[in-house]
Image (cartoon, rainbow, N blue to C red):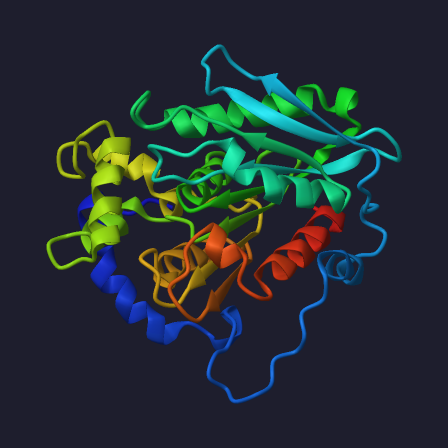
Amino acid sequence: MRIAVGAAIGAGAVALALLSLIPSGTGTSTGSGRRPTPSPSASQAHAQAHPASVTPSSTDIKRRTVAYGKHVHQRMDMWWHTSGAPRPAIVVIHGGWWSGGDKKTMTTISRNFARLGYTVANIDYRLSGEAAWPAQRTDTLSAISEMRKIAAHYNTDPGRYVIVGFSAGGQIAAAVATYENGLPGLRGVVGVSPVISPLTAFADGDAGGTNDQRKLRSTAIKLAGGCGPTECPGTWSSMEVAEHVSPKDAPMFTVHSKDEFVPPYQSELLKRALESVGVPMRIMVKPGTAHSAPLYREPGVAQAVYSWIAARVTADR
C-alpha cells in the first residue's frame, strides 16, 4: 500500500478525525464505572493464554552477548534455556528517540520474558547519529537473521518468534515486520508507544506541539539524515510503516496511553492499512500520559502482552 508523502504530512490532522471511528473493542475502556478485573501474575497470564506453549523457568537460564555485525552497537544479549524443547523467541528493541538508549534499559523486561520460558534476543542497533535510516531496520533484520542462524546453539525454535519494540523501537519493529511480504518465522509484533508514523510525528511537532512532540519531530528529521519530508520524500516514505503493509505480514498489537505524545491514532492508521489486506491488529489504550516502559508497567499492560504473545507463538500460521 502506497500513500503519497505530501498527503501523509497532514496525517496528524486527518488521524484526529479517525479517533471517533475507532471501534470500542480495539482498546481498553476507561471511565465505564465497572470494577476492573484483578490482573493475574505474569506466569498466570501466560498459563491462562496457552498452558502448553512454553515452560516458565528461572533455574536454567543463561545469558551471552553475541555480535551480529562489526559495529560496536551491532550486538545482542541472548537469554536462553539449557533444558527442555527448543523455545520460541522474543526479539526486544529498545527506544530512545532513535538517537539514544541501549539494550541495558531492557534487561529487566528481557529477564522476565526469559523466566516465562522464552529465548530472548535483546538487541542494540546503530543510532541515528551513527547512521541514518534505514540502518536501524537493516540492523534489526541482521540480528534476527543471526538469531535464526544460531538457533540450535541456543535451544531456540527459529520458526516461532515475536518482536517487541518500545517507542522508537516500536517503529523499527513494525517497519521490519512490513519490510517484506511476511518474514520467515515471525508470528507477531508488539509495540509499546510505537512511533508508527514519523510523518504524523513531524506534523504534530510543529510550533503548536508539546515539548516532547517538538523533540520527536526533530529526532525524526535526524533519523532521516537531517532532511525533512519535502527534501527527502523517499526516506520519509521508507520510514512510514503503513505504506508497506502486505497480506502475509504478521499480526500486530500496540499499546498507547490516551494522552501521551505518541497518541493512539498513529496505530489506528496502521490498523486500517493492515486490515485492508487482511492482517489483524489490536490496539490497547490506557488512560493517562505514560510512555514506553512506564506505560508497560501500568496495571494490566504486561499481562496483556504476555497473553497475546503466548497465543501468537502457538497459533498456526
Q: In this orientation, does residue 26 appear?
A: yes
Q: Position of residue 95 (x, y in %)?
A: 43, 40
Q: Position of residue 190 (x, y in %)?
A: 55, 49
Q: Is residue 183 left or right of residue 242?
A: right
Q: Quadrant of residue 208?
A: bottom left
Q: Quadrant of residue 147?
A: top right
Q: In this picture, is 162 found above or below 232?
A: below
Q: Position of residue 33 (x, y in %)?
A: 52, 89
Which residue lies at the image location 46% right of the left edge and 20% below the top edge? 73
Q: Is residue 259 left or right of residue 164?
A: left
Q: Is residue 84 left or right of residue 24?
A: right
Q: In this orientation, does residue 181 appear?
A: no
Q: Is residue 45 left or right of residue 274?
A: right
Q: Residue furthest top?
A: 70
Q: Residue furthest right?
A: 84
Q: Position of residue 153 (x, y in %)?
A: 77, 20
Which residue lies at the image location 57% right of the left edge and 51% below the top edge? 251
Viewer-nearest residue: 246 or 68: 68
Which residue lies at the image location 72% right of the left edge and 46% below the top edge? 313
Q: In this picture, is 164 found above or below 119?
A: below
